[in-house]
Amino acid sequence: GQNIDQPTEMTATEGAIVQINCTYQTSGFNGLFWYQQHAGEAPTFLSYNVLDGLEEKGRFSSFLSRSKGYSYLLLKELQMKDSASYLCAVTKAAGNKLTFGGGTRVLVKP
Amino acid sequence: DVKVTQSSRYLVKRTGEKVFLECVQDMDHENMFWYRQDPGLGLRLIYFSYDVKMKEKGDIPEGYSVSREKKERFSLILESASTNQTSMYLCASSFDDRRINEQFFGPGTRLTVL
């Protein structure tokens, strides 16, 4: 089976940093995706990690530790428009099938 | 820009009705997926397809079927809609042979079954 856990909700202040953790236990692992989903909209791709380490992309960074079954998404210099749900998803060794966590809703306050 | 479109944003149906949800992508993607999204449960995979006329069950296929007659179109069918199928349905597509095969999502169809 597969189990992917992430916090349900987080609140942070504009300009601050927020770290969204994701832990997974899967039978077979190829890589981990992070998606952003604004309310009422489609999820959009943020990052993909397949090797251990940190991948930085502007204000957003994603980290993966395969041995610990752990990833985080780091959002820096938070802006109001970053208020959204952030979805962690893992893919197995073969194919493109994704298994998603429940999503973390981030609320950015002024 | 990749575009994934779904036939309806909102749909209201009655219990027992047959429901068709259509999804079209314009980027020549090999893979297409249907998910449902429910509060607290995240996105759950219903069915996916790697090629025309091919389909595979996802994690929650019961009560659903799919059809992929053309590469760009993937249909989700509820043979006899039930109230527990009230949900947001999201279609996605992706390439099969790239280093990062991210999925591109459609805007979703919010289905209410009365």
Image (cartoon, grey):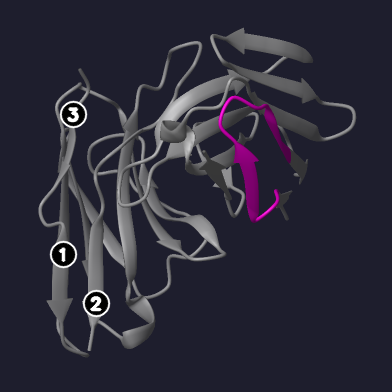
Within the image, what quadrant is residue B84 found in? bottom left
Asked whether disc 1 touches disc 2, contact meaning CB atoms under 8 Å apart, the reply is yes
- Work out which quarter of the rendered image holds the N terminus of chain B and state it: top left
In the image, the segment drawn in magenta is: A6-21
Labels 1 and 3 within one chain: yes
Left or right side of A71 for B23: left
Give the spatial CA distance, label 1 vs label 3: 19 Å
Q: Observer-nearest residue: B9 or B24?
A: B9
Label 1, secondary structure: give it: strand
The residue labelled by disc 2 is B112
Verify CB contact (< 8 Å) between mark 1 and mark 3: no
Among the 4 quarters of the image, the one containing residue B46: bottom left
Check disc 1 and report the residue beneath it.
B10
Image height check: is B88 above or below B43? below
Whether residue A30 is visible to the viewer of this picture, yes or no, is: no
User: Quick check: A18 above or below A59?
Assistant: below
Q: Of label 1 and label 2, which has the lower sequence position?
A: 1
**For mark 3, what is the residue?**
B3
Establish whether labels 1 and 2 are both on one chain.
yes
Q: CA distance from mark 1 to mark 2?
A: 8 Å
Dot 1 alpha-carbon crowd within 10 angstroms: few under 14, some 14 to 19, many 20 or more: few
Give coordinates of residue B114: x percent, y percent.
Answer: 22, 89
Hey, which residue is sitting farthest front in the picture? Answer: A110
The residue located at (66%, 21%) in the rendering is A62
Q: What chain is tagged by disc 3?
A: B
